């Protein structure tokens, strides 16, 4: 109804800090190592906050969400200075410390992370969609930025374990304004273009090494694609294109799910079924709270 | 049997008019090769050359005292193979092996030169030879100290560029990881790690066979010197 929506639109959700973490080369590890690594991620984040002397912040986390090879979590916005400063340094130290022990899992097991921090209004209270909103999407886009990936590629895997990117708003409101433990000079501005997200952002590496030190953070000068590769490049670009994430919550009996990949299917005691479905051309069929048929087609 | 249409001729074929290439092919003997078959063998005497019509090949040279084979070049449709054979008592300087099913046309060196003269395209042939030498010199110098990841990216990019225009799987890499290691003088473990890195970056698809998932990014890596 128009009136209900008018009310919603008159109040901004609270501003929250969003941190999205992605593990490098998750799929490069063997399947048997995946669960262990997935399990480790939130542990490592918590220990990092501990190291930084802010263990209380972990207990204030909001909508923690594991994505298999990564993690998304919200924090009170006023704690951004910690997230952008001491937390990143501590995470670097923590992963360096864990690196030795990961060797016991296998010679090639490594945990290196890309971290994105954004801030903005966040619908954390919405029952059907906790922790969603443009700010969350922004953090996911930032963590996928090619410029950020290349920071890991260009640095020594035995020395650099964390590379970070913060949104323009975070940089302006926290770093440039003099909060936290980092200076603007420790960040490098970059223009991020991931799917439809196009904004400037700021890169930071707590402990740079390798080519990052010798060549700097700027990605290599781009040479124009030769014409015979243009078609193929366009094709692979399109093929990698949009994947959609659908969250469906409600009571269901006899659910049918067809999906590219299924995250978790959780059956609660109260007969609630929560499914997270990703990929293109998904059909999720079930029943909503009122017992009505709900069909969601995603493309 | 007529050959499939050439969308964008490359190599020597791009330097001469289409009727000239067709006449060269008509005067030659058609031969087919299967993956890993030798089109030319190093040190064999050479009196003929090959016009490569379809499929990709690798040119490898065996080091002295059996030091292992080094990749000299990759060639694709439109290229000539063994064209330096005609001068005096020449032996093949390298072996040429098929990476996938190939079709090539074998023509005696004398007949080849006669046709070049008749159609006044001898200069184009010279230009082709010089271009090959330049490319070889550039590549050796540029790639000498370059990080293995970029060298692998460069190799993969070359392979994608050389695929037939009508190739059903132009993004698939027709080289095993072992062959890549041998070609670039890297350890197999190093190549495996690089392939895993590239998969993690989304440059290659997950799982076997090795296939390119992001040509744009591969191109950036291949030119990161």
Image (spheres, coloured by chain):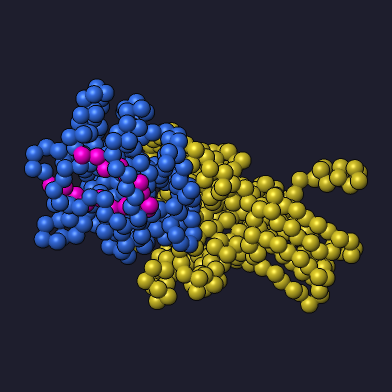
Q: Quadrant of the C terminus of chain B?
A: top left
Colour of chain A in the image: yellow
Q: Which chain is blue?
A: B
Which residue is depicted at the point 57% across and 38% down? A199
Residue range (magenta)? B91-108
Given residues B31 and A242, the one toward you in this image is: B31
A122 left or right of A293 in image: left
Residue A239 in percent (x, y) is at 56, 47
Image quadrant assignment for residue A11: top right
Q: Is residue B135 above or below residue A245?
A: above
Given residues B209 and B221, the one toward you in this image is: B209
Residue A121 in percent (x, y) is at 70, 48
Residue A242 in percent (x, y) is at 62, 48
In the image, residue B222 lies in the stretch drawn in magenta: no
Q: Is residue A37 visible?
A: yes
B68 left or right of B52 in image: left
Q: Is residue A122 above or below residue B190?
A: above
Q: Magenta residues: mostly which secondary structure?
A: strand
Image quadrant assignment for residue B125: top left
Q: Quadrant of the N terminus of chain B?
A: top left
């Amino acid at each position: 109804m128009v009136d209900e929506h008018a009310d919603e639109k008159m109040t901004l959700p609270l501003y929250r800090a969003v941190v999205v973490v992605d593990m490098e080369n998750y799929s490069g590890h063997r399947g048997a190592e995946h669960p262990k690594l997935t399990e480790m991620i939130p542990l490592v984040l918590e220990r990092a906050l501990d190291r930084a002397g802010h263990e209380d912040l972990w207990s204030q986390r909001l909508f923690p969400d594991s994505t298999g090879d990564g993690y998304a979590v919200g924090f009170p916005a006023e704690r951004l200075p910690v997230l952008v400063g001491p937390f990143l340094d501590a995470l670097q130290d923590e992963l360096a410390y864990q690196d030795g022990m990961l060797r016991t899992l296998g010679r090639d097991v490594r945990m290196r992370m890309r971290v994105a921090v954004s801030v903005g209004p966040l619908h954390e209270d919405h029952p059907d969609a906790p922790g969603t909103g443009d700010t969350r999407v922004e953090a996911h886009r930032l963590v996928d930025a090619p410029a950020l990936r290349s920071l890991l590629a260009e640095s020594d895997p035995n020395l650099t374990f964390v590379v970070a990117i913060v949104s323009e708003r975070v940089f302006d409101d926290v770093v440039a304004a003099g909060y936290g433990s980092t200076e603007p000079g420790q960040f490098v501005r970059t223009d991020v273009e991931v799917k439809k997200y196009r904004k400037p952002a700021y890169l930071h590496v707590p402990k740079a090494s390798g080519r990052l030190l010798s060549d700097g953070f700027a990605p290599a000068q781009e040479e124009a694609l030769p014409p015979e590769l243009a078609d193929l490049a366009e094709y692979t670009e399109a093929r990698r294109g949009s994947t959609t994430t659908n969250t469906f919550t409600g009571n269901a009996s006899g659910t049918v799910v067809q999906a590219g990949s299924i995250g978790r299917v959780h059956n609660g005691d109260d007969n609630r079924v929560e499914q997270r479905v990703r990929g293109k051309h998904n059909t999720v069929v079930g029943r909503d709270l009122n017992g009505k048929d709900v069909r969601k087609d995603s493309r | 049997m007529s050959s499939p249409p050439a969308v964008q001729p490359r190599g020597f074929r791009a330097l001469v008019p289409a009727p000239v290439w067709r006449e060269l092919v008509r005067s030659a003997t058609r031969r087919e090769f299967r993956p890993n078959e030798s089109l030319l063998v190093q040190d064999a005497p050479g009196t003929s050359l090959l016009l490569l019509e379809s499929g990709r090949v690798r040119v490898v040279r065996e080091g002295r005292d059996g030091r292992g084979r080094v990749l000299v070049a990759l060639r694709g449709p439109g290229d000539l193979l063994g064209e330096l054979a005609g001068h005096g008592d020449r032996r093949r300087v390298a072996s040429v092996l098929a990476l996938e099913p190939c079709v090539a046309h074998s023509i005696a060196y004398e007949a080849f030169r006669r046709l070049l003269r008749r159609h006044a395209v001898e200069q184009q042939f010279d230009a082709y030879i010089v271009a090959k030498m330049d490319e070889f010199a550039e590549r050796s110098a540029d790639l000498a100290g370059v990080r293995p990841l970029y060298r692998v990216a460069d190799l993969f990019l070359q392979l994608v560029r050389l695929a037939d225009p009508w190739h059903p799987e132009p993004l698939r890499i027709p080289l095993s990881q072992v062959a890549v290691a041998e070609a670039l003088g890297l350890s197999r473990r190093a190549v495996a790690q690089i392939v895993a890195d590239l998969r993690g970056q989304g440059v290659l698809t997950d799982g076997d066979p090795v296939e390119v998932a992001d040509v744009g990014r591969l191109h950036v890596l291949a030119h990161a010197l």
